[in-house]
Image: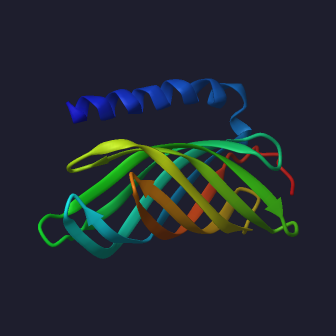
Amino acid sequence: MQSLRRKLCACLVMIVAVPFVAADIEHVYTNVAVGQSEFDNSVSGNRIDDEGAAYRLLVGYRFGDFPALEVGYIYFNELAGERADLNVSGLTVGTTGYLPLNPSYAIRGRVGLMRWDARFDEGIDAYGSVGLLAQISRDIELTLEYEVYEIEDYEIDAIMFGIQFYNSTNTRTR
């Protein structure tokens, strides 16, 4: 049943994204990131205090220089607990704001909702991040972000390093 739900959510994300892509491809970007996540709490009596790798892929649509909408997927490597391990992954939908520091650097803030799935539970909760973008060419930016994902009453913190690609016809300016 969970596999069917994931497939339906992925289809919904693609259906929602198509009009944005078709309307104005030059404002679409893709971000791929890897990082280190940390979880320190108890889930159903299972004490978990672990660090692991995190992987993120997202697609965004930037409305001019400042706001953007994003959809993505994040996966946190298996977190080891006293009695059982925990796998957490999820689909994200959120908004992003930019504060330019100069033509090559900007601060980025992201907030949104994550539809998460863990081995023993699932739900929808909030996430947020703050980070720095460094433009290294017209079409490529490097990102460094601190992210916090709420999972019911618990949180996963992550430091993510990514690369963001824009369409080569992008006419954005900062």
Q: In the image shown, does 164 or 92 lie closer to the viewer?
A: 92
Q: Which percent across, then down, holds residue 155? A: 43, 62
**Is residue 166 toward the left or the right of residue 116 in the image?**
right
Placement of the C terminus among the 4 image quadrants: bottom right
Decide: is 3 above or below 90: above
**Is residue 163 toward the left or the right of residue 11 in the image?**
right
**Is residue 12 toward the left or the right of residue 144 in the image?**
left
Identified at 53% across, 53% down, the residue is: 127
Identified at 15% across, 73% down, the residue is: 82
Q: In the image shown, does 79 or 14 lie closer to the viewer?
A: 79
Identified at 76% across, 58% down, the residue is: 138
Q: In the image shown, does 23 or 93 lie closer to the viewer?
A: 93
Decide: is 45 above or below 74: below
Q: Looking at the rendering, which quadrant does residue 86 occupy?
A: bottom left
How many numbered marks are there?
0
Q: Looking at the rendering, which quadrant does residue 46 occupy?
A: bottom left
Q: Which percent across, then down, holds residue 136? A: 72, 69
Decide: is 96 above or below 158: above
Q: Which percent across, then down, holds residue 21? A: 63, 31
